[in-house]
Amino acid sequence: MERSPFGALLLDMGGVILTNGWDRHARERAAERFNYNHEEGGMTLDQYLDHIVFFKERGFPQDDFKGFRFSQSQPYPHMLHLFAEIKARYGTKVVALSNEGRERALDLVLLPLDAVVYIDNTPFHVEVAWELGISAIVHVDRETTVAALRERLDRSSNAPHHRAMCNRATRRGEYDAAMERTIA
């Protein structure tokens, strides 16, 4: 087993290893399919259903709605394979996170912050990780994520420079250009 400069990968599920199953667009599709108005809010699925969808009698069962909601998340097999390969090759801990579980993840991996890489498709979440001292990657697609991980393997001593450069670039909406300059 080869040695890796990171001990754990923390992976956002929606948008990295699964499709975004309950993003704004999926909620709009559900509202259209089941014919209701929807509003967004930070609540659990059951709270959402009770307060937003089933606050009145509906012509469809709650289980049908949940089934539709869950069917919106589909795996990205190429990403699942990539992370399984990294785990097997390097012995890296791989943790899949939902937004609700992000805070507990560091407690679960039992590693120092500099041994963790967080991967998310939302630049704001990646920026928060950087501000906490966690190396992070904005996932755009498999190729850019592989390149960013390879860069960490090849030049792990330059990770703080890479993190700072991407942090500034993300604020200007230039992540892709920054990533290209770093890898080149």
Image (tube, grey):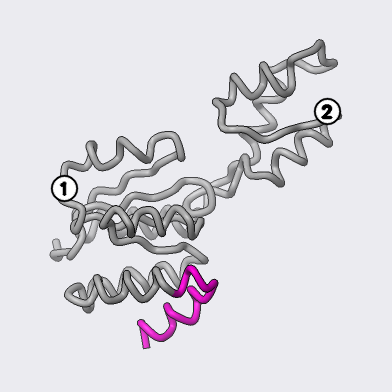
**Where is residue 101 drawn, in percent x and y?**
39, 35
Residue identifier under label 1: 111
**Where is residue 146 drawn, in percent x and y?**
39, 69
**Where is residue 105 drawn, in percent x and y?**
30, 40
Q: Which quadrant holds residue 28?
A: top right
Left or right of residue 131: residue 112: left
Instruction: Inspect the magenta stretch and tell me whether residue 150 lies in it.
Output: no
**What amino acid is labelled 1 in the image?**
Leu
Q: Is residue 81 above or below residue 51?
A: below
Q: Residue at x 31, y 75 (%)?
A: 162
The answer to whether marks 1 and 2 mark residues whose Cβ atoms lie closer than 8 Å is no
Q: Dot 2, how many residues are within 10 Å of its Cα: few (below 14), some (14-19), or many (20+)?
A: few
Q: Mark 1 or mark 2: name the one nearer the start of the chain.
A: 2
Residue identifier under label 2: 36
**Where is residue 9 drawn, in percent x and y?**
30, 53
Q: Residue at x 29, y 61 (%)?
A: 135
Q: Is residue 28 above or below residue 91?
A: above
Left or right of residue 92: residue 35: right
Left or right of residue 20: residue 150: left
Q: Quadrant of the C terminus?
A: bottom left
Q: Quadrant of the N terminus?
A: bottom left
Instruction: Please give the label number shown on residue 82.
Output: none
Left or right of residue 155: residue 14: right
Q: Residue at x 56, y 32 (%)?
A: 42
**What amino acid is labelled 2 in the image?**
Tyr
Q: Dot 1, how many residues are within 10 Å of its Cα: few (below 14), some (14-19), or many (20+)?
A: some
Q: Which residues are magenta?
A: 169-184
Q: Nearer the viewer, residue 42 or 75?
A: 42
